[in-house]
Amino acid sequence: MKQIKHIIFDADDTLWENNIYYLKAANDFYNLAEKQGVNRSQVEKAFDELEIKVVKELGYGSFNFIFILKELFKQFELSNKLNHKELNFIIDEFNSHKLKKPKLFEHVADLMRQLSDKYELYILTKGDQQEQESKIIKSGLVQFVVKYFILDEKDDAAYAKLLSAENWQSNETCMVGNSPKSDINPALRNNMYAIHIPYKNTWKVDIEPIINKNGKYKEINSFKYLKDIFLLD
Ligand SMILES: [Mg+2]
């Protein structure tokens, strides 16, 4: 990978924790419904179905996630005074993570600093513009990147557009991320290099089989191994 000049990092669940807050709130919500005698797997199923629809129609982000919880609250007729209080507590707790600095994974800050001496680094994320930007800025990583991009979707067309707009050669460009669907497969289909760092709490909508594990694909189980790939000569 000696020819790599540009390294592009996914943000959520690659540089910092993100989906755990969603999983916690969803789980708390399922508990609330279950306490009211609603079948848990039925709520989970309804959640998954509505989530796919909402993501398609309204996009990604925490506001749409809260919208789903509120919709299901109505749909399963959970409305009473105590439950309202509990739902608000779940939402407040979920929202509080957004006020804090993102919790960076181990080695991220140190390695981004070292990598930025040798490579052009970028952050590429999808979701709500303001929400993603706030995380990027609070993360303290902006100082190491040339630029960051916040897109509505990270699909094949988005990567192709980026390569051409930024004038990057695909064989000089490497994508690093946790999501097969949004980071790895579209990068590989655009002939870029792709490094997958699987993460156990990856959002299930982002999971799919990797299209081609040969050639330009590498999998590592921790951010720290980027050092072996990019910094040891
Ligand atoms: Mg991610």
Image: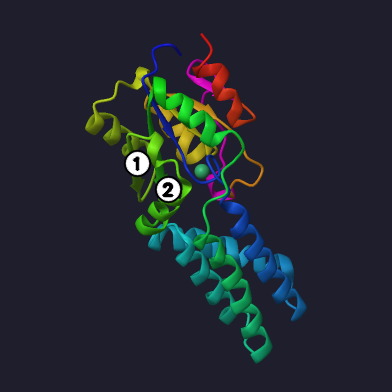
Residues in magenta, as a range: 204-219
Q: Residue at x 66, y 71 (%)?
A: 29
Q: Which mark is residue 136?
A: 2
Above/below status of 217 relative to 142: above
Residue 192 in sight from this viewpoint: no
**Residue 31 on image: x %, y %:** 73, 71
Q: Nearer the viewer, residue 101 or 125?
A: 101
Question: Which amino acid is tagged 1?
Answer: Tyr
Left or right for 12, reference 45: left
Left or right for 36, reference 44: right
**Residue 13 on image: x %, y %:** 55, 44
Left or right for 204, reference 67: right
Q: Is 156 contained in the magenta span?
A: no
Ligand 1 has an atom within 8 Å of the beta carbon of the residue at disc 2: no
Q: Nearer the viewer, residue 114 or 174?
A: 114
Disc 2/disc 1 C-alpha distance (Å):
8 Å
Q: Residue at x 44, y 41 (%)?
A: 141
Q: Residue furthest bottom?
A: 81
The answer to whether mark 2 and mark 1 are in CB contact below 8 A is yes
Above/below status of 131 relative to 233: below
